Amino acid sequence: MSDIPDALRYTAEHEYIRETDEDRVVVVGVTDYAQGELGDVVYIELPSPGDEFSHMEPFGTVEAVKTVSELYCPAAGEILEINDQLEADPSLVNSDPYGEGWMIRMRLKPGADLDELLSADEYRSVIGDEA
């Protein structure tokens, strides 16, 4: 059974978004389910601070031993920071996807609606992981 924190919002493509204490600033990464399906993550390509993305636009890739998957931006916004630790240790995505394995911090564009994303229960239904 995958770890699916109730406080986060999710995409059907297995990204999560976590709100921060800063106004309209969120943290994005891939879910525990996604990292488990990918297997050992060996490389991550992330955007640069200042880059802007639309809702569900690809913002990077994650490469595992046997596959490469695109990463999709859960909401429209501007990249503020990338997790530089992932360059040296991409396996943080496997060991701590919701903590040290986060990928980007971004500022949401005005009007970006997190209610369009999946709740934890809705995401559990998508992956067939009923609690």
Image (spheres, grey):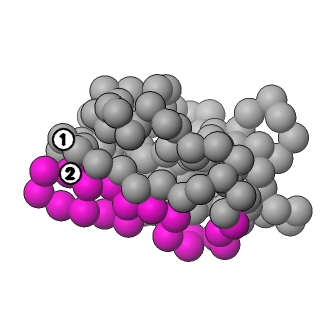
Q: Residues within 10 Å of mark 2 (few under 14, many from 20)?
A: some
Classify 4 as above or below 114.
above
Residue 96 counted in the magenta span = no
Q: CA distance from mark 1 to mark 2?
A: 5 Å
Q: Nearer the viewer, residue 55 or 130?
A: 55
Sequence-wise, which precedes: disc 1 or disc 2? 1
Number of the label disc, if any, that sits on residue 64: 2
- The number of numbered discs placed on residues in the rendered structure image is 2
Percent of width and height locating residue 103: 50, 43
Res 47 quadrant in image: bottom right
Percent of width and height locating residue 58: 49, 70
Classify 61 as above or below 36.
below
Please give the residue where the numbered disc 1 appears in the rendered image: 40
Q: Which quadrant would the C terminus be assigned to in this image?
A: top left
Res 63 quadrant in image: bottom left
Q: Which residues are magenta?
A: 52-72
Q: Would you say the residues marked 1 and 2 are in contact, meaning their CB atoms lie under 8 Å apart?
A: yes
Residue 1 visible in the shown view: yes
